[in-house]
Image (spheres, rainbow, N blue to C red):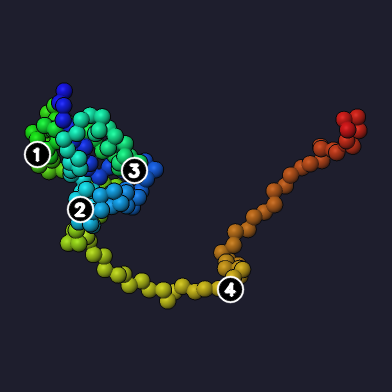
Amino acid sequence: MPDIYSVIYRGDIAPGFTLVQVRQGFQDMFSLDDQKLGQLFSGRPVAIKKNLDYSKAEQFCALLAGFGAVAQIRGAESSAPSDAGDAAGQPTREEDGITIAPAGADVLTDDQRRQVPPRQVTTEHLSLDAVGADVLRPEERKSVEAPAIDLSHLKIEPADDSES
């Protein structure tokens, strides 16, 4: 087990917090500009604190969790984003070409967005009527015949006064 640890952040947000709250927390704590904040929320692992013992790394993670940032503690030798993969043999991001963007991130560039031309919809055949007007013509109405129900076998008796 290593003696030196790093705190790694890759843009994860704790449940119950918003991206705006976490960005504001980082900005207040570290006085970061928008470019540096963008790097923190790029989805790539960023070592935000290095060369700590485990208890200090836990304290720092708890501090980050206070404003909704979910960070990881890694041994110093595994904190570099260019390591060969984890112990289970998972490929690195460079090998598989897939990255995960943080929640709420804008993942498409302008040239990847499909431009939808406005449609020309004709509305000459439509009409409006006054509020509460009957909009069905008589020939469009369904006629409902009242069902013939024989109730001659039923009778109504006076209520029993003993229950009250």
The numbered dot on residue 36 is 2
Q: Nearer the viewer, mark 2 or mark 4?
A: 2
Q: Residues within 10 Å of mark 3 (few under 14, many from 20)?
A: many
Q: CA distance from mark 4 to mark 3?
A: 53 Å
Whether pointer 2 and pointer 1 mark residues with C-beta atoms closer than 8 Å, the reply is no
Of 149 and 124, the residue lying toward us:
124
Residue 114 image offset from top left, x and y in percent: 22, 61
Q: Which residue is mark 3?
A: 68
Place residue 86 in its image quadrant: top left
Of 85 and 52, the residue lying toward us:
52
Q: Residues within 10 Å of mark 2 (few under 14, many from 20)?
A: few
The amino acid type found where label 1 is placed reads: Ser
Quick one: label 2 or label 1, which is nearer the N terminus? Answer: 2
Q: CA distance from mark 2 to mark 1?
A: 20 Å
Q: CA distance from mark 1 to mark 4?
A: 69 Å
**Does residue 162 sit above or below 118 in this rendering?**
above
Tag 2 secondary structure: helix
Quick one: label 2 or label 4, which is nearer the N terminus? Answer: 2
Quick one: label 1 or label 4, which is nearer the N terminus? Answer: 1
Residue 104 image offset from top left, x and y in percent: 30, 51
Q: Nearer the viewer, mark 2 or mark 1?
A: 2
Residue 58 image offset from top left, x and y in percent: 27, 32
The numbered dot on residue 82 is 1
Q: Nearer the viewer, mark 1 or mark 3?
A: 3
The amino acid type found where label 4 is placed reads: Ala
Tag 4 secondary structure: loop
Quick one: label 1 or label 3, which is nearer the N terminus? Answer: 3
Q: CA distance from mark 1 to mark 3?
A: 26 Å
Q: Which residue is mark 4?
A: 130
